[in-house]
Structure formats: C-alpha cells, structure tokens
Image (tube, grey):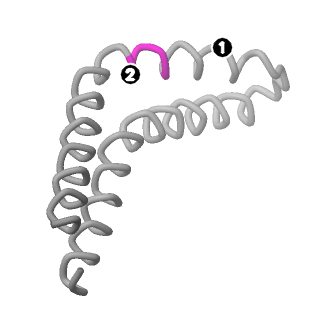
Amino acid sequence: MQYQQFAMVGRETLQSVLFTVGPVLLAALAVGLVLGMVQAATSINEATLTFVPKLVVVAVVLALSGPFMVTTISNFFQSVFTEIARVGR
C-alpha cells in the first residue's frame, strides 16, 4: 500500500467522523453555552436544567440527521472494504 493510499484512508476516516459526530456535538455545545449563560445570569445552579434540554436537543438532532449519518458511515466502510480487497490481490 502506498503512502498516498494511507493518507487517503486517513483523510476519509477523519472526514467521516467529523460529518457523523459534528452536528450532534455542535448542537450540544450550543445548548450548553446558552444554558450556561442563562444560569450565570440568573444564579440558578440546577443540574437538570442543563441535562434535560441537552438530552432533548441531541435526540432531535440524532433523529433528523440519522439517515445522513448511516449513509456516511456505510459509504466509508464500503470504501475501506474495497481498499482491503484491492490490497489483498
């Protein structure tokens, strides 16, 4: 296997992880940031105030972007298995 093939698989791996996990992490980060500012402004230190909205937002984002995530992961694994079969020849 050439260096370029390793680099291509590594780049594709990072890209697939970013596209798969990115929307969920960004949504949780945004909700956490907004709720953190609200808690700091109102001096309310309730743990469930941050947990429940984050849980709901992550569930909604997973439900909306689930098909895209599955397609991205299946395309990635298909390309990886194709590369494995090509190296085995």
Residue type at numbered disc 1: Val
Q: Secondary structure beneath disc 2?
A: helix
Residue at mark 1: 52
Left or right: residue 18 compared with residue 47: left
Q: Is residue 75 above or below residue 11?
A: above
Residue at mark 2: 61
Few, some or many residues within 10 Å of mark 1 (<14, 14–19, 20+): few
In x, y percent, where is residue 11? Answer: 27, 68
Q: Is 81 contained in the magenta span?
A: no
Q: Nearer the viewer, residue 24 or 79?
A: 79
In x, y percent, where is residue 30? Answer: 49, 37
Q: From which residue to which does the magenta span run?
A: 58-62
Q: Is residue 20 above or below residue 7?
A: above
Q: Residue at x 56, y 33 (%)?
A: 34
Q: Residue at x 77, y 15 (%)?
A: 48
Left or right: residue 78 compared with residue 39: left
Using the numbered discs, state the Cα–Cα distance from disc 1 to disc 2 in whole angstroms. 14 Å
Left or right: residue 81 compared with residue 48: left
Q: Residue at x 24, y 50 (%)?
A: 81
Residue type at numbered disc 2: Val
